[in-house]
Image (spheres, rainbow, N blue to C red):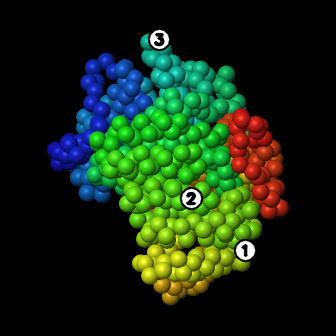
Amino acid sequence: MSWKIIQRYRYILEEERGTIRKDWGGRLAIALAYPNRYHLAMSNLGFQTIYTVLNSFDHVVCERVFLPDPEDMEEYQRTNTPLMSLESQKPLQDFQIVAFSISFENDCINVLKILEMANIPLMSEDRGENHPLIMAGGVVTFLNPEPLSPFIDLFIIGEGEEILGEFLRILNHCLEKGLGRMERLEYLGKEVEGIYIPQFYEVGYDSQGRIKYFQPKGGLPDKIKSGRLKEVDKYITQTQILTAHTEFSNMFLIEIGRGCTHGCRFCAAGFIYRPPRMRDWYRLKDMALKNMHKTLKIGLVGAAVSDLPNIPTLCQSITCRGGKVSLSSLRADTLTKELLEAIKEGNSRAIAIAPDAGSERLRCVINKGITEQDIIEAVCMLVEGDIDTIKLYFMIGLPTETNRDVEAIISLSKRLKHHILSSSKGKRIANLSLSVNSFIPKPFTPFQWVPFERVKLLKEKMRLIRKGLKGERKIQVTFDLPKWAYIQALLSRGDRNVGKILMAAHKLNGNWKEAYKIVNVNPDFYVYRKRDFDELLPWDFIDHGIKKGYLIEEYKKAMECKTTPICQPESCQRCGVC
Ligand code: SF4
């Protein structure tokens, strides 16, 4: 046991406000693990929400666990200390449940690291009665849990808030009845909607490695219906713990709603969080004002924050009390003078908008629903509002993309710079900061059948953009690394066999290149292969309520460059969710 780590954890706790402390006596102990460092985890509202929800049950004590920082990692290894929770510094082996909250595919490898550091067998089948139950939830797992399925005993598929209550009730019943580990898992898989127990599902493959069948053993359901929060206002989704030692340092985050009306065809969140559900704005105002004594920095988060009716009034009610508002996302077509005024009063110096594609044609393909004129008007408005840095998000490798579309990113950026110069009128000239990322075809979107762009081509497209904007003052460009995007695509689109690559990459300390060589599973088969509409996809057993036929229809419309109007839940039934 390392005294140094214990002291460091105590220091972190002293720096926090809102930590929940509970006695263990007789309670179900759950370690909520974030598979990355504290600094990132504590800005994740989903992680904080599940911490609050689990601790809201009187019979539960939930503590947090993180991937240690490099210096702590060394200390853990040097002293041979098993991984500990933050709150009580108890080893993970002492908990009855270890629950992972996973938001990013590239964090999956850290799940294995955490289990290893806790001396818990990595494979689900190797765990016995005395090991904690290993659970996982979070958006990565309800898009496609399969690459992680050899390591996880139980997945929570869907929005956790509603499923967790029923899960805990049934688990209690199992414990009271004295059921063993496997009986407990089987019972939970049968009785609780939204629970997926991979060990109880058998997968068969054809000679080419495509899935031939996916079937439950015993009486478990064929399809796992994902959990969905019916009344968003029933739960408060906001920061529980404030700390300076995180990305959004001392910022109080409030979720304005779930889902998004726009149906951008590349966006998984826009499909799996359907229907769009906005919170009542009076309630949001109440949440903000009640917590402003803790911090004046309020962050409003959601898929399309500027779509919230009354958003300018909400922002003003915060800024007029001395608060500073930060918005996670702005749509170019919903930016108004009133909203900008409110953002300005909150002292925001940088604002991001996402054209996503450079050409009008490609924006139609992805159903972005904004025109070049919308983007220009938004940028001019931001300049007039004295914003220093305008961030623009673009993707490369989108379906049907040609070099002309990539060149359109360059020409649009130059035109925007021209508009910035002419709107600046003697003021300080705003910077244009481009963030260019590789498109990942995600499950449950109309693009789930398309292949990931070849890494070689992505690099060429990046070179084209770099060259096209070389020497342009006031325009900066950053790119993601295609090799990491490739791994993200592999974990998004893979089946159970990809778990073997994940295990090898873990054993090789994250050397994926070597892992691809030593495992007899071809990663390109998952990443670069176009899938047929009638192929059984690894994630097809999850039911998010969206009809596959609707996704196919949307795919075909994309290929014909036709757009689809926004969601209108009161009158529309087209995708099957409402
Ligand atoms: S049924 Fe219509 S309104 Fe409801 S989520 Fe689907 S597309 Fe949107």
Disc 1/disc 2 C-alpha distance (Å): 30 Å
Residue 464 location (% of width, % of height):
61, 81
Is residue 131 positioned above or below 305 on the image?
above
The answer to the question of whether label 1 and label 3 lie on touching residues, with beta carbons closer than 8 A, is: no
290 vs 72, left or right, is right
Camera-side residue of 124 and 565: 565
Q: Is mark 3 within 8 Å of ligand 1?
A: no
User: Is residue 361 visible in the rendered structure shown here?
Assistant: yes
Disc 3/disc 2 C-alpha distance (Å): 57 Å
Q: Quadrant of residue 2?
A: top left
Nearer mark to the viewer, of 1 and 3 = 1
The residue at which mark 2 appears reads as 335
Residue at 62% across, 59% down: 333
Quadrant where the C terminus is found in the figure: top right
Can you tell which mark lies on residue 402? Answer: 1
Disc 1/disc 3 C-alpha distance (Å): 62 Å
Camera-side residue of 73 and 565: 565
Residue 575 location (% of width, % of height):
75, 41
Q: Residues within 10 Å of mark 2 (few under 14, many from 20)?
A: many
Q: Which badge, 1 or 3, comes first in the chain's sequence?
A: 3
Is residue 439 positioned above or below 474 on the image?
above
Residue at 39% across, 47% down: 318
